[in-house]
Amino acid sequence: MNSNNPFFKTNAFKENNEVTHDAVIIDYNQTMTVSGTVNKSFLMIILLIASAAITWSMPNPIGFAIAGAIIGFVLVIISTFKPQLSTYLAPAYAVFEGLFIGGISAIFEYQYPGIVIQAVSCTFVTFMVCLALYKYEIVKVTDKFRSVVLASTMAIATYYLISWLFSMFTSFQPVHYGNSMISIGISAFVIVIAALNLFLDFDQIEKGAQSKLPKYMEWYGAMGLMITLVWLYIEFLRLLSKLNRK
């Protein structure tokens, strides 16, 4: 049940023994369900879009975008250690992450008109394809599958971190910053790994529902899924911007 999404790598998704104890009467209305997680995911998307509209319409959204990214990251960290607070933190994350997404999208749209709707469309199509492949068991999440995706994601995170540190303190220009074929190839590879994360997230949510985890885990699961979708959308923006420059 270990997910590649770091947000899902928490003990909160272990089987809840309390609700299965003989002395406890299980109230299934108070346990996690797949449909409940889906509904909360849609609600978070609505909140994100509404929040993104604020920074989208600003003449200079960079300040709000940075603040939204920082606060959103802090909320994710808190939820990782305190998943029982996800009922409140998940909607707040959607709002602040929306500020970030709206600001970044406005900047990209100004440079490359039409790129946002393309990135949104690519993200939506990727999500639906992955969902269909998972639902009809065309792609099955096995231990080997998890291991490969986890290793790839850790490699990407390490590369991004090292590149960022080098670019800050030296004149080093990371290869993925340009629009060369290698840079485009790296972006395409990252998008594939981000998409594979969706399968692990679907599997984690389904297993959480089967284990009858507490109701607040629906918010936790929805928050984790949104983290992956935001990452996927940002990577599509980056890839499309490189293709537009070429």
Image: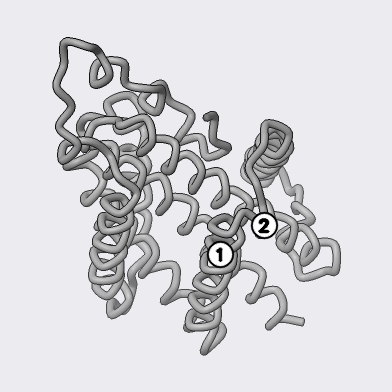
Q: Where 89 falls versus 95 (above or below)?
A: above
- Secondary structure under tag 2 reads loop
**If the image is split into quadrants, where does the C terminus sit?**
bottom right
Q: CA distance from mark 2 to mark 1?
A: 8 Å
Question: What is the three-letter code of the residue carrying label 1?
Answer: Ala
Q: Left or right: where does residue 71 sit relative to residue 226?
A: left
Q: Where 58 falls versus 21 (above or below)?
A: below
Q: Which mark is residue 132?
A: 1
Residue ID at (26%, 55%): 40
Q: Position of residue 100 (x, y in %)?
A: 37, 60
Specify few, some or many for label 1: CA neighbours under 10 Å numbering under 14, 14-19, or 20 or more.
few
Q: Position of residue 36 (x, y in %)?
A: 26, 51
Residue ID at (43%, 25%): 10
Q: Are marks 2 and 1 in contact (CB under 8 Å)?
A: yes
Q: Nearer the N terminus, badge 2 or badge 1?
A: 1
Q: Where 178 falls versus 83 (above or below)?
A: below
Specify few, some or many for label 2: CA neighbours under 10 Å numbering under 14, 14-19, or 20 or more.
few
Front residue of 90 and 111? 90
How many numbered discs, if any? 2
Q: Position of residue 190 (x, y in %)?
A: 68, 55
Q: Left or right: where does residue 223 sit relative to residue 3?
A: left
Question: What is the three-letter code of the residue carrying label 2?
Answer: Ile
Q: Which mark is residue 138?
A: 2
